[in-house]
Image (tube, grey):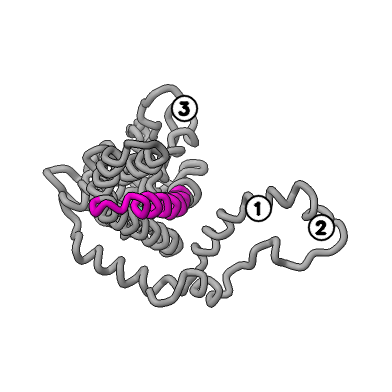
């Protein structure tokens, strides 16, 4: 990227920082007191929000996203990188290796006689950076655009940190331990900025979290009327409302499979997806990023979703109504 991030953000005219706006009277007085520290504390979040709204990042986002999608077609390799076999995204677990090693190396650098141990930790962290980057890129390629903007800056920060630690290892290997320590400390600072953005992406913007998790808590206990069986054409995905909940129903002869309609990955409308057969099981594929769930129990067959899609038990009453209730899980 030839332009600096700061220049890109300024060009977009994204939302100005609240503290920079003119203030008068009571508002001005309020800003001078303890509230100033609160505003300062919110500045990192404000910067992350500005990145979310920075369309100037869209060109590199699009180019990188296309590259990743081309290099990583749907299949077992993509599923493994998303973390489907583990039931949750692999990226958060893998980033602990480089970040933990690098933090430890910088701390050891404050003590005498630890050069060899620090150098080893820097090298191990560098080895762990590659799988971290691969899993992160796989997850990033299946996000919304505003999430991808934050993810791109997060990735640039972590790539910068990795480069600095690589340079640090080189300096240490050639006996320039002072330079090595300085490069490591700078790398850790950059990695911390990147980690903050990663936290914003996961915890504020919900990347990697299950978007279907609260569903079972929104459905009251017991059986509920959903719709007459005659309203469900055989083999077609139909959306039906149950109170606040949007449910997906798929009739197969006299059996009705019911899942939450909001995809666990990012909330996509499953009823607009496709019915497919995978390993002899009837599944639904999400129209947004292709996550595939088994309709009988919501199990994840293909990612990027890693969390099971909430499933409902169903039964047909004598009067021909379909009734549903949440599948039994742990206590609520
Ligand atoms: S919302 Fe992404 S796969 Fe469904």
Image check: 94 left or right of 76? Answer: right
Secondary structure mostly seen in magenta is: helix
Instruction: Give the Cα separation between the discs numbered 1 and 2.
Output: 16 Å
Name which of mark 3 and mark 1 comes first in the sequence. Answer: 1
| Res 68 visible | yes
Q: How many neighbours does mark 3 have within 10 angstroms: few (below 14), some (14-19), or many (20 or more)?
A: few
**SS for tag 3?**
loop
Disc 3/disc 1 C-alpha distance (Å): 46 Å
Q: Are marks 1 and 2 in contact (CB under 8 Å)?
A: no
Q: Quadrant location of residue 322?
A: top left
Q: Residues within 10 Å of mark 1 (few under 14, many from 20)?
A: few
Q: Is residue 320 above or below residue 61?
A: above
Write down the region rendered in magenta. 173-199
Where residue 253 sits: x, y (%)? 22, 42
- Residue in the image at 46% along x and 38% along y: 214
Q: Nearer the viewer, residue 129 or 273?
A: 129
Q: Is residue 101 magenta?
A: no
The CB of the residue at mark 2 lies under 8 Å from ligand 1 = no
Image position, residue 180 (x, y; %): 34, 52
The residue tagged 2 is 27
Residue on which the image places disc 1 = 40
The answer to whether 268 appears left or right of 44 in the picture is: left
Q: Is residue 195 magenta?
A: yes
Q: Which residue is mark 3?
A: 221
């Amino acid at each position: 990227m030839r332009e600096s991030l700061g220049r890109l953000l300024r060009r977009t005219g994204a939302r100005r920082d609240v503290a920079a706006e003119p203030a008068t009277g009571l508002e001005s007085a309020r800003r001078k007191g303890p509230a100033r520290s609160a505003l300062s504390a919110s500045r990192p979040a404000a910067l992350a929000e500005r990145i979310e709204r920075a369309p100037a990042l869209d060109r590199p986002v699009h180019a990188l996203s296309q590259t990743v999608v081309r290099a990583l077609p749907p299949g077992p390799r993509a599923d493994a990188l998303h973390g489907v076999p583990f039931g949750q995204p692999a990226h958060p677990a893998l980033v602990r290796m480089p970040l933990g090693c690098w933090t430890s190396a910088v701390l050891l650098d404050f003590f005498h006689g630890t050069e060899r141990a620090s150098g080893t930790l820097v090298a191990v962290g560098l080895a762990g950076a590659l799988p971290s980057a691969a899993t992160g890129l796989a997850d990033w390629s299946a996000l919304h655009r505003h999430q991808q903007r934050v993810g791109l800056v997060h990735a640039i920060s972590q790539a910068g940190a990795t480069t600095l630690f690589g340079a640090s290892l080189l300096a240490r290997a050639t006996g320039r331990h002072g330079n090595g320590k300085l490069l490591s400390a700078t790398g850790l600072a950059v990695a911390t900025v990147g980690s903050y953005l990663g936290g914003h992406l996961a915890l504020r913007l919900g990347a990697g979290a299950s978007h279907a998790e609260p569903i079972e808590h929104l459905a009251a206990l017991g059986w509920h009327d959903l719709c007459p069986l005659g309203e469900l054409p055989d083999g077609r995905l139909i959306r039906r409302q149950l109170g606040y909940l949007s449910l997906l129903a798929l009739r197969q002869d006299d059996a009705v499979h019911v899942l939450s309609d909001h995809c666990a990955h990012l909330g996509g409308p499953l009823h607009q997806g496709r019915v497919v057969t995978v390993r002899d099981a009837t599944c639904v594929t999400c129209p947004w990023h292709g996550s595939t769930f088994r309709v009988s129990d919501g199990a994840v067959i293909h990612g990027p979703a890693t969390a099971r899609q909430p499933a409902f038990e169903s039964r047909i009453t004598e009067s021909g109504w379909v009734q549903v209730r949440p599948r039994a899980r742990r206590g609520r």
